[in-house]
Image: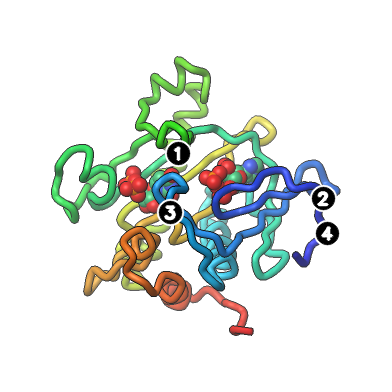
Amino acid sequence: MSYPHGAELYRGKAKTVYATDDADLLLMHFRDDTSAFDGEKKAALQRKGMVNNHINAFIMTRLAQAGVPTHFVRLVGPQDSLVRRLDMVPVECVVRNVAAGSLVRRLGVTEGLVLDPPLYELFLKNDALHDPMISEDHALAFGWASAAELKRMRELSLKVNAVLKPLFEAAGITLVDYKLEFGRHGGEVLLGDEFTPDGCRLWDAGSGERLDKDRFRRDLGGVVEAYEEVARRLGVDLPAAG
Ligand code: ADP
Ligand code: UDP
């Protein structure tokens, strides 16, 4: 890693988080590891960490410019970014523009059904329990987030959609759904974690071809190539292949 860092604080399924000499800043390292089905299926995909780090930096910068407060500070290496340390809310916020994935399995609705206005759902971030769906009342009852935090998370999740749906559309890509994580920082709620093809569904607007982690989940192959295609279409600068 190209940035001076301290102790490893957390090793997740796809990223490792390190302390730095500034207590307010963390180094987020995007590994080449990929996982699905709560970590049951795993693989290492060359270049994925680098591609995701750069897509995330691009998206987080666009969101910040549009007024969504994020933890992202700057890129500090091919697979590394500096972020503000957040007290994470253990809730995953999912926004859906088109029915797919667990929504289709849960409710039996047709995949591809357009959801307008978009659908907003909450899930508890807990692999052992397979990230069960929850309501805002569950989050309140068990102290996972306050009413004000939940209101802000919903508002920011939908603002992200207002920014990113047209951004992807202009690149010939349908933003089907995505997962966001938020955290607390100095009394404010900031967008944390990542926005990459690992945490959203992206379909080619013309052919419907999957350009996201479903390629890995469904053994379609060409996972990183699809992520690189997303980067190319968005105009993300990637370091040349070494
Ligand atoms: P997972 O925990 O789902 O396996 P990752 O491999 O992506 O996920 O690990 C990244 C971890 O870092 C996640 O648990 C995420 O909630 C946490 N995280 C993301 N952004 C921040 C931040 N700014 N401050 C503290 N923790 C963060
Ligand atoms: N998602 C994610 N991490 C999770 C659960 C979901 O990044 O732990 C993303 C997923 O990639 C998709 C969206 O959130 O873009 C909605 O996921 P869904 O509820 O359909 O679950 P899935 O079938 O993908 O497990």
Q: Amino acid at mark 2?
A: Gly
Residue ID for mark 2: 6
The residue sitting at 38% across, 43% down in the picture is 94
Q: Nearer the viewer, mark 2 or mark 1?
A: 2
Residue 161 appears in the rendering? no
Q: Is residue 45 above or below residue 72?
A: below
Residue ID for mark 3: 41
Q: Circle 4 sits in a helix, a strand or a loop, which is it?
A: loop
Residue ID for mark 4: 4
Nearest to N terminus: mark 2 or mark 3: 2
Q: Residues within 10 Å of mark 3 (few under 14, many from 20)?
A: few
* Residue 133 as seen in the image, left or right of residue 98: right
**Badge 4 vs badge 3, beta-carbon distance below 8 Å:** no
* Residue 173 as seen in the image, left or right of residue 90: left
Q: Residue 233: x and y, percent? A: 42, 76
Q: Which quadrant of the figure has residue 76? A: bottom right
* Residue 238 as seen in the image, left or right of residue 227: right
* Residue 25 as seen in the image, left or right of residue 152: right
**Disc 2/disc 1 C-alpha distance (Å):** 28 Å
Nearest to N terminus: mark 1 or mark 4: 4
Q: Amino acid at mark 1?
A: Glu
The residue sitting at 22% across, 48% down in the picture is 115
